[in-house]
Image: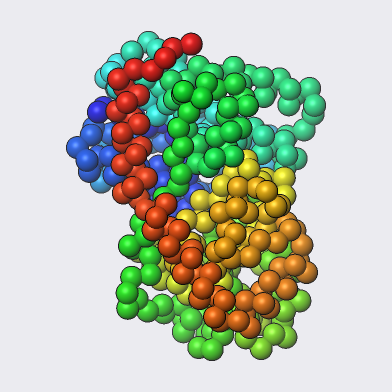
Amino acid sequence: MRLLIYGLNFAPELTGIGKYTGELAAWLAGRGHTVSVIAGPPYYPAWRIEPGYSAWRYRRETWRGVTVIRTPLWVPARPGGLKRLLHLASFAASSLPVLIMQAFKRPDVIFVVAPSLFCAPAAWLAARLCGARVWLHIQDYEVDAAFELGLLKGRGLRKVVLGLERWLLRRFDRVSTISGRMLELARRKGVDARRLETLPNWVDVDAICRPGCQSRYRSELGIPPHAVVALYAGNMGVKQGLEVLAQAARMLAAHPKLWFVFCGEGPQRDALHALCKGLPQVRFLDLQPAERLGELLCTADIHLLPQRANAADLVMPSKLSGMLASGRPVICTAQPGTELAGVVGGKGIVIPPEDAQALVAALEELADDPCRRHALGRAARHYAQRHLHIDAVLSEAEKALIHCIGGIPQG
């Protein structure tokens, strides 16, 4: 295949959408396909351009057999509603001429990754002009989430924007997303079921918690060997509702065994750090290198997965796959009946969102019961091996892409 991937985030970003888009591109290139990527310079989750890259220049590079074209991008230091929209629009505008030039090379598929939906109309038009199939992969429903989280407001605005989104989604040859509930939402937005695909986020299970792997993080952070470590590792943004972690850590300050490690970057990191000031059993880590991911995840005895209530079923946290692969139980904040609660059930403890007291109770329960921790962890690892292994997931994605080129019913 000749595949053009078009999306804002890409490797070497270590977390979130960029990580998965990079792994998808590299895996397909390794299978002998010709893969090109249009992306912005790496900036996530710190919301600052990484050293060695420019926010204002175009750049072409080769990464793991993939041709990557970086386009200019405005990155706000403190992303909010309007700033985030301008940020997304800047990439859509700067990448448009590159998209047009790449379309002249006649790719078989233009694969658009959302966010950002700003790029979708131009990608659809470019595909129609050059005869390519066009595929939209939704990592999260940015429009719905923006209104649910209060980043965008107004009943009239919401009706208009969601109407435009529905119109656009129905025009793609394929629409995929990462969970069953998110796929069902696409169906409710009017996408023909014959055009829908499930493409869950994957994990290299074999690279997480290799036999004999020893974690150095405890000694580096000064955590006692007997401690029970509760780890949050990932983006520190608005969707996560991280305040509940600080509240629980403060309520458990006198617990004889529980320690907390908060690892990552994002706009809410400083606020979380301030809320934890003076707590001796809390440690903060910057975003860690990819080669230490498995070691970091296996430092935990318990993984923490907070999520605001109104984000449920609009996103499926990408960090969950690594947590499960590490063979540790997960404490997740989700409403009963959501898909996130269903996945974590039997592999950890599900508690109500933004409920610090429930989080404290769950932490105490697992800290005092190593046998249950181990049983839940084994179930988590087994699930990851059966359902989330990178080769299994991406082999199915490759088949679906080839089938897409072969033709589908047109509306």
Q: Is any part of residue 155 visible from this angle?
A: yes
User: Residue at position x 51%, y 80% from top?
Assistant: 221
Residue 16 image offset from top left, x and y in percent:
49, 49
Residue 165 image offset from top left, x and y in percent:
61, 23
User: Residue at position x 66%, y 61% from top?
Assistant: 350
User: Can you tell which quarter of the image residue 67 is in?
Assistant: top left
Q: Quadrant of the N terminus?
A: top left
Residue 39 image offset from top left, x and y in percent:
41, 36
Q: Is residue 382 above or below residue 361?
A: above
Task: Specify whether 120 is left or right of 129.
Answer: right
User: Residue at position x 41%, y 22% from top?
Assistant: 134
Please identify the residue farthest to the right as the structure is shown.
155
Give the total of numbered labels. 0
Residue 329 image offset from top left, x and y in percent:
54, 68
Q: Is residue 261 above or below residue 386?
A: below
Q: Is any part of residue 51 visible from this angle?
A: no
**What sort of colour scheme is used for the picture?**
rainbow
The residue closer to the viewer here, 330 or 74, is: 330
User: Can you tell which quarter of the image residue 205 is in?
Assistant: bottom left
User: Can you tell which quarter of the image residue 206 is in?
Assistant: bottom left
Please identify the residue farthest to the left as the structure is shown.
32
Task: Specify whether 13 is left or right of 221.
Answer: left
User: Residue at position x 63%, y 54% from top?
Assistant: 341
The residue closer to the viewer here, 78 or 164, is: 164
Q: Is residue 34 above or below residue 124?
A: below
